[in-house]
Image (tube, rainbow, N blue to C red):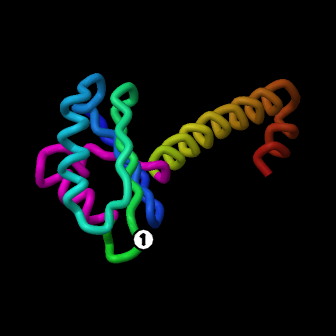
């Protein structure tokens, strides 16, 4: 079960697998979050399993919302990822693919010529 969260001041998106396809569970999470002072609106999407919470920026409300979700069993930070994590994973994979392609090209070029061209590629 993977969770997702993205928090910018005033807006928090949380993917909660337990509400996907379960409108009753989504309504329960919405009711829980409405009790937090500073929360302005809550929109649940049971097709994607995500909740968007708009809140008054500041006062660490994003962290408070995540804490309430965690305390009530709706969010597990150890299973969560965010866009920074997704970008890091994608760029790492892209870097790995590009390195392999470049090394393959360099070795191919080096082996198609003489030993001197091999040294030129290494330099």
Number of dots carrying numbers: 1
Can residue 81 be seen at all in this image of the molecule? no
Can residue 58 be seen at all in this image of the molecule? yes
Residue 114 within the segment the image draws in magenta = no
Q: Residue furthest left?
A: 72
| Residue 11 place in picture, x, y as percent | 44, 58
Main structural element of the magenta stretch: helix, strand or loop? helix
Residue found 72% across the figure and 36% down from its top: 102
Q: Residue furthest bottom?
A: 59
Neighbours of disc 1 within 10 Å: few (<14), some (14-19), many (20+):
some
Lateral position of residue 59 relative to residue 100, left or right? left
Residue found 30% across the figure and 27% down from its top: 20
Residue 82 within the segment the image draws in magenta = yes
Q: 47 or 76: which is nearer to us? A: 47
| Residue 112 place in picture, x, y as percent | 84, 24
Residue found 53% across the figure and 47% down from its top: 87
The magenta span reads 62-84
Q: Secondary structure at mark 1?
A: loop
| Residue 79 place in picture, x, y as percent | 26, 43
Tell me which corner region of the image, top left, top right, bottom left or bottom right, holds residue 66. Answer: bottom left
Lateral position of residue 107 relative to residue 81, left or right? right
Q: 76 or 18: which is nearer to us? A: 18
Question: Dot 1 corresponds to which residue?
Answer: 57
| Residue 1 place in picture, x, y as percent | 25, 32
Residue found 54% across the figure and 40% down from its top: 90
Q: 122 or 66: which is nearer to us? A: 66
> Considering only vertical position in the picture, is 74 above or below 100?
below
């Amino acid at each position: 079960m993977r969770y997702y969260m993205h928090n910018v001041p005033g807006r928090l998106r949380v993917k909660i697998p337990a509400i996907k396809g379960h409108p009753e569970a989504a309504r329960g999470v919405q009711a829980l979050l409405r009790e937090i002072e500073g929360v302005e609106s809550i929109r649940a999407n049971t097709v994607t399993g995500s909740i968007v919470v708009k809140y008054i920026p500041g006062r660490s409300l994003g962290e408070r919302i995540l804490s309430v979700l965690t305390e009530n069993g709706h969010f597990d930070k150890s299973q969560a990822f965010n866009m920074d994590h997704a970008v890091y994973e994608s760029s790492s994979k892209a870097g790995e693919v590009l390195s392999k392609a470049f090394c393959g090209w360099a070795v191919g070029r080096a082996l198609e010529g003489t030993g001197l061209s091999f040294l030129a590629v290494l330099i």
